[in-house]
Amino acid sequence: MAKNRYWVVRHGKSIPNEQGLIVSSMENGTLPQFQLASDGIHQAKLAGQLFYKELEANNIPLSHVRICYSPFSRTIHTAQLIATVLNLPFQSPHYKVIEDLRERYFGPSFELLSHDKYLEIWDMDAKDPFVGPEGGESVKDVAFRLARAMTIMESEFEGCAILVVSHGDTLQILQTILLAANEHKETTDDDLASVLEAVQVAPILSQHRKYSLLTGELRGVI
């Protein structure tokens, strides 16, 4: 189904994580003061080492690696540290920033408030993933743009090992649609874009919390 193999990594522990703050808007998320905390720097380097071991185990040369990342400070910082571990220059064709991989925007009612508020959002998601917080993105909204990000990566790369460096909710939702698409492909000859669209239904999208990642956690997807 896919032309490439995919791994995901959630950014290392960030300064907002450390402060217990929700930082989800592009305006705030790209500020330099919201990059990685010292623990997160260690986590990002460890993720880079684990990814390198995955490449070795699968006999994938570094020339076939592509790292696609969100434009937020904490994901850029994570991607840069992984670049250092892999010895792949960050300003090179191996790296691509994709805006559609950004954090899920939780809206003005939650921005810069406590992490405790996530529980309210996830309750909302479980009831109806097509309805998001006021002024923010629903699970469906994020799934739509992630399907678009997948189309970009699949059209630009072939036969590559792609590491997607992104955020908690974003990567939960990405895994949800990719794993559902993987199951769905067995019953259809449709292309990836069509399958990703077909699986964006409430019973599937409402389950995204099953695929949560710790900060700095690396996971193979497809």
Image: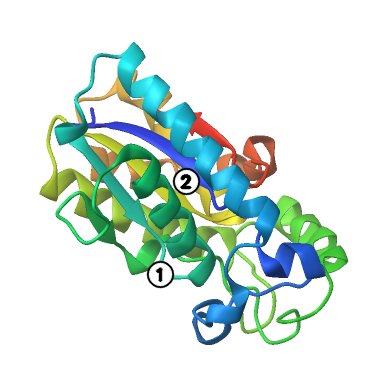
Residue 91 in the image: x percent, y percent? 22, 62
In the picture shown, does residue 206 fall above or below 139?
A: above
Q: Secondary structure at mark 2?
A: helix
> What amino acid is at disc 2?
Leu
Q: Name the mark nearer the viewer: 2 or 1.
A: 1
In the picture shown, does residue 55 fall above or below 190?
A: above
Quadrant that contains the N terminus: top left
Quadrant that contains the C terminus: top left
State the residue position of label 2: 174
Q: Quadrant of residue 25?
A: bottom right
State the residue position of label 1: 71
Residue at the limit of the structure toward the right, as seen here: 116
Q: What residue is at 29 percent from the left and 39 percent from the top?
A: 162
Q: Earlier in the sequence, mark 2 or mark 1?
A: 1
Q: Secondary structure at mark 1?
A: loop
**Apparent side of residue 30 relative to residue 187 in the rendered image (left or right):** right
Q: Nearer the viewer, residue 222 or 191?
A: 222
Q: Nearer the viewer, residue 79 or 110?
A: 79
Q: What residue is at 57 percent from the left and 69 percent from the top?
A: 35
Residue 143 in the image: x percent, y percent? 46, 55
> What amino acid is at disc 1?
Pro
**Apparent side of residue 206 relative to residue 73 in the rendered image (left or right):** right
Q: Quadrant of residue 52?
A: top left
Q: What residue is at 53 percent from the left and 83 percent from the top?
A: 31
Q: CA distance from mark 2 to mark 1?
A: 17 Å
Residue 177 in sight here: yes
**Apparent side of residue 174 relative to residue 193 in the rendered image (left or right):** right
Residue 81 in the image: x percent, y percent? 44, 51
Q: What residue is at 62 percent from the left and 37 percent from the top?
A: 211
Question: Label 1: few (<14), some or many (≥20) within 10 Å?
Answer: many
Residue 13 in sight here: no
Residue 66 in the image: x percent, y percent? 24, 43
